[in-house]
Amino acid sequence: MSALVEATIDGQAVRVAPGTTIFDAARGIGITIPTVCHLPPQDPVGVCRVCVVDVGERVLAAACARPVAAGMKVVTANEKIATVRRTLIELLMADHDAPCARQKESGDCELELRAQELGARRGRYDAGPQKRPPIAGWRPADDSHPNIAVDHAACIVCDRCVRACTEVAHNFVIGRAGKGNATVITFDAGRPMGESTCVSCGECLVSCPTGALMNKGFGEARIPGTPVAAEALLAIRGPEGDRPLLDGISPKFLAKTLGPIGRNDGAVVERRFRPGEVICREGDFGSTAFYVAQGKVEVAITTPLSRVRNEPGSLRRLALRMKSLLVSEPEPDRDVTPGTTIPIDAPVDLARAHPVATLGAGDLFGEMTCLNFYPRSATVRAVEHTTLIEMLRPVLQILLRSKGFRSYLDASYRARALETHLRSIPVFAGVSDDFIEHLRPRVDLLHVAPGEIICRQGEPADSFFLVRLGFVKVAQQFAGGEVVLGYQGRGSFFGEIALLTGEPRTATCSAVDHVEVVRIGADDFHLMLERFPGVAVGLEAEAARRRERDRAQRALSSAVDVEEFLTQGLMEAQSLLLLDLDRCTRCDLCVQACASAHDGVTRLVREGLRYDKYLVATSCRQCRDPLCMVGCPVGSIRRRETLEIQIEDWCIGCGVCAENCPYGNINMHTFEVTVDDREQPGRKKAAVRQKATACDLCKNLGPDQEPSCVVACPHGAAIRVANPRDFFAQRLGR
Ligand code: CMP
């Protein structure tokens, strides 16, 4: 070992190892040198120079970066040094928005504290021109990240976050861009932080000396239960007990996020359940996810798997009496065979024949409710004594971005869910076990933020996608505007057309909310088609169906210029129920016919928008943007080939589709069922459940049958118009 270096600091003798900085040597003898940019154990960079000391040279030296030299006489404080430090701080303060958010919130902005200590006055120097780095779409404030708010106006470009991200966490997300006063920190060289590859480890946030990177907190949200402290959360190991689930997350960040101040107590809690106790019920709204720390839970759909059917009565014309019943036989004119499983918000899907599954330690459920605020897709109850960690969205997002947890979830999906997920899609049912083995390590699991594009119309294709969580919007641009072709939820797939035809993508697919997709590369996709001709035939048929439907929708949407249509929202409609007010005597027989056709609950309301002498009655308009399809937690709403909405019999009655329909055309239908009484095992009790119903154009009466409201109108005033634009163009000459 080389000899120690001897020097003096403020007259005190020091003996330090070669290479020791003046800053560290001084600290070793109890002398604190002020700094802003230096944060051991990060490597010093000497950018703020507030730590300057006098080493007897012509200029002062940065103590954080200058090693102690033999015989050096260091002075860490005198009038000259104080003046220089004050000036440096005043220059930094000129571009710092004081008081910054951190100073306002907790009074510990390091720059502002140093300014107070050194007597630096704000405003001695004018602020430089506003930062304008050469980055398209750059904004001084970036609120895109779920946990961290970025305020470039408070940033002094000290590089602490850059070093934290690079040297400490090895994530390499944060860097710098721009020159001089326009220098800023960047995420993945210029993306909004929320769209970058940031893993939310929080290292940058705990390193930032100012309010430039701030913890967003959880507001007032709290969940009842025993709050889980950061250390307890960090101590949780995966079910194999090998390594901490939250590997890679900064303990300080987590502690800060969960709130020693008490503000965030209740953002993540531990809850214990006895056998049989209900954890959450299908259809209920929620905002939390659950991690099973210990025990076992049963996930089931308890609403009967039946559909509301309208039974035709004996009077054919005026009355067309029909009664709503819950029936379980298949829809007679179904155009697509449904899969054998029901997609739910858990690592498993439920079998339609017996919609019950079990989850155990290490499973996460309720992700979709938590991330996207959809209703619970199933009822979950404890099977044995069970301990769950229940968390709010910001905590789940920290978990999902943590390398350890993410890789644990990914591995668990590959091992346990890929097979059932793939096989739950009817077209892939025939894929062999060995091919699934082949796919297991090769698929990519992608998390896509709301609004992000997954594949773009016109671009070449290299992948095929399965939707695992959330909703993907499929939209096509054409000369007359954009048409939304559909929304794909869990259990659907997209991206097959371009791979099958070798042509560019036919549509743009983007995330409506927090989406997870499974990406299968083009090579594996083609290998699968080669090995399983049945899959190829099924996919070809689905692609042809989609293309045909797209063509029909485009044809309906072309050459538009009826302005009033736009303002009245009728443009969305591909089919309207109109009442000709010149003919209508307000006898309400149409409404009565609809009501009798639907167990006393009309799906037709004789009021609505007016266009010339026509009243646009409230009934399913088969919209161009079928918003009702977004958010169904169990994927039970879909479009028929003929574009009207169909609600499948595993609807759990949560009402999201009815709420999302902008025209109020989906009704909730209540009925009584007999269910097992959990409080008194072996006994039954009556319960009220509901299911959604949409105008079905009375399709069940036969393919050529007019809707009953149209048939019932004695004056010919009620008309169903298949192409409103052509209709109005012809009748009204517009
Ligand atoms: P591809 O053309 O490769 O990329 C865009 C994808 O959107 C396309 O494959 C289909 O998977 C999907 N798509 C196109 N039309 C529809 C539709 N009508 N309904 C659902 N998905 C569609």
Image (cartoon, rainbow, N blue to C red):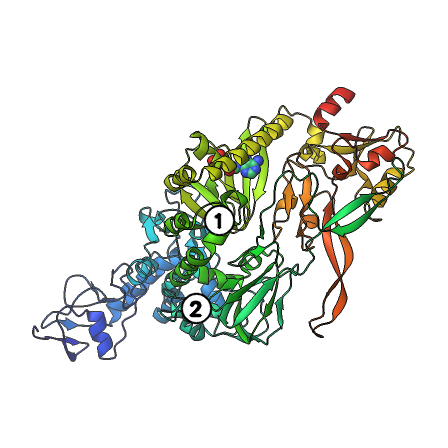
Is label 1 within 8 A of ligand 1 (CB to nearest ligand atom)?
no
- Viewer can see residue 216: no
Is residue 513 shown above or below 66?
above
| Crowd tier of the residue under label 1, counting other residues whose Cα lies within 10 Å: few below 14, some 14–19, many 20 or above | many
* Residue 426 image offset from top left, x and y in percent: 54, 45
Element type at marker 1? helix
Pick the quarter of the image with the N terminus: bottom left
Check the image and report above or below for 174 versus 276. Answer: above
Give the quarter of the image for residue 161: bottom left
Tell whether 32 sits left or right of 220. left
Q: Is 594 on the left-hand or right-hand side of 301?
A: right
Instruction: Identify the residue position indicated by label 2 in the image.
Output: 254
Left or right placement of residue 255 versus residue 632 in this view = left
Q: In which quarter of the image is the C terminus?
A: top right
Q: Residue 726's spot in the image, x, y percent?
A: 71, 23
Q: Position of residue 271 (x, y in %)?
A: 55, 74
Q: Which amino acid does label 2 sit on?
A: Leu
Q: Which residue shows up at 86% across the image and 38% down it?
A: 590
How far apart are the alpha carbons under marks 2 and 1? 36 Å
Q: In which quarter of the image is residue 523?
A: top left
- Between 74 and 659, which is closer to the camera in this rendering? 659
Kind of residue sitting beneath label 1: Leu
Say which residue label 1 marks.
422
* Percent position of residue 111, x then y: 37, 64
**Label 2: few (<14), some (14–19) or many (≥20) C-alpha neighbours in 10 Å:** many
Q: Quick one: 578 or 423, which is closer to the camera?
A: 423
| Residue nearest the viewer, comparing 375 with 451 | 375
